[in-house]
């Protein structure tokens, strides 16, 4: 048997198989590359979504704390003015209820160091709320007074600022750009 007769078809078959394998391997490499790129894009999207959700949680917690403090202040100044009290009481109740909802959600999302600040603010809000309500009901405890409530409210504004600074630090507010959640100021 002539070696050339056998070699030529064998070389042709190897060439065709090589060409087909090359195309197959190139296709698989391209598929792997697209899959990795898609996974990277999904990871970036997930990180951005998580950052946006955390930012929104921080904004809601800060806003609800501010509204609660403002409602406490209004309630304190309305003491003794019966005409204003029903509206102010309702506003305080609404602010308190809203803050409780926001804080409950925040407890599931916030990192510990921010949650410590949020917990201190929430606890302080509850304590001042109790004092203001007892004053409003005419059943104050020893130490309850409009002056003490006012001091408590002022201390809570300072705690709220500390909490906001911690939130901003957690978000990287001083690293981010203008359009990113981290770049927005609070």
Image: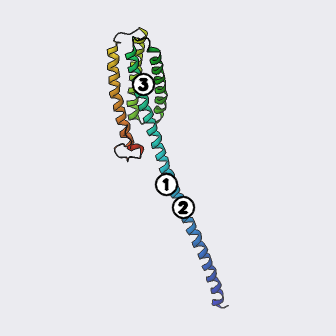
Task: Tell me where residue 13 sits by quadrant.
Answer: bottom right
In the rendered image, residue 87, in percent from the top left (x then y), is placed at 47, 18
Q: Earlier in the sequence, mark 1 or mark 3?
A: 1
Categorize mark 2 by other alpha carbons within 10 Å: few (<14), some (14-19), many (20+). few
How far apart in space, not on screen, are marks 3 and 2 (Cα)? 53 Å
Q: How is the image coloured?
A: rainbow
- Label 3 secondary element: helix
Does the rendering let one see residue 98?
A: yes
Q: Which residue is mark 1?
A: 40
Q: Earlier in the sequence, mark 3 or mark 2?
A: 2
| Residue at 59 percent of width and 72 percent of height | 21
Residue 19 circle label:
none
Q: Quadrant of the C terminus?
A: top left
Closer to the observer: label 2 or label 1?
1
Extreme residue in the top direction:
138
Q: Which residue is mark 3?
A: 68
Q: How many marks?
A: 3
Extreme residue in the bottom direction:
2
Foreground: 61 or 185? Answer: 185
In the rendered image, residue 52, in percent from the top left (x then y), is placed at 46, 42
| Residue at 51 percent of width and 58 percent of height | 37
Q: Earlier in the sequence, mark 2 or mark 1?
A: 2
Task: Tell me where residue 129 sits by quadrant.
Answer: top left
Q: Quadrant of the N terminus?
A: bottom right
Categorize mark 3 by other alpha carbons within 10 Å: few (<14), some (14-19), many (20+). many
Considering only vertical position in the picture, is 138 above or below 125?
A: above
In the rendered image, residue 178, in percent from the top left (x then y), is placed at 38, 46
Residue 32 circle label:
2
Does the rendering let one see residue 127?
A: no
Extreme residue in the right direction:
1
């Amino acid at each position: 048997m002539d070696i050339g007769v056998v070699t030529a078809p064998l070389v042709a078959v190897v060439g065709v198989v090589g060409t087909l394998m090359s195309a197959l391997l190139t296709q698989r490499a391209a598929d792997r590359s697209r899959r990795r790129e898609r996974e990277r894009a999904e990871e970036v999207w997930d990180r951005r979504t998580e950052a946006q959700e955390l930012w929104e949680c921080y904004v809601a917690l800060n806003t609800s704390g501010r509204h609660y403090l403002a409602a406490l202040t209004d309630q304190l100044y309305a003491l003794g003015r019966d005409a204003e009290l029903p509206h102010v009481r309702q506003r305080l109740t609404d602010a308190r209820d809203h803050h409780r909802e926001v804080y409950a959600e925040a407890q599931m999302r916030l990192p510990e160091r921010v949650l410590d600040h949020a917990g201190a603010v929430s606890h302080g809000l509850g304590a001042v709320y109790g004092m203001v309500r007892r004053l409003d009901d005419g059943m104050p405890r020893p130490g309850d007074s409009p002056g003490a409530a006012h001091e408590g409210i002022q201390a809570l504004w300072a705690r709220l600022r500390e909490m906001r600074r911690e939130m901003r630090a957690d978000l990287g507010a001083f690293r981010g750009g203008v359009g990113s959640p981290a770049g927005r100021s609070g």
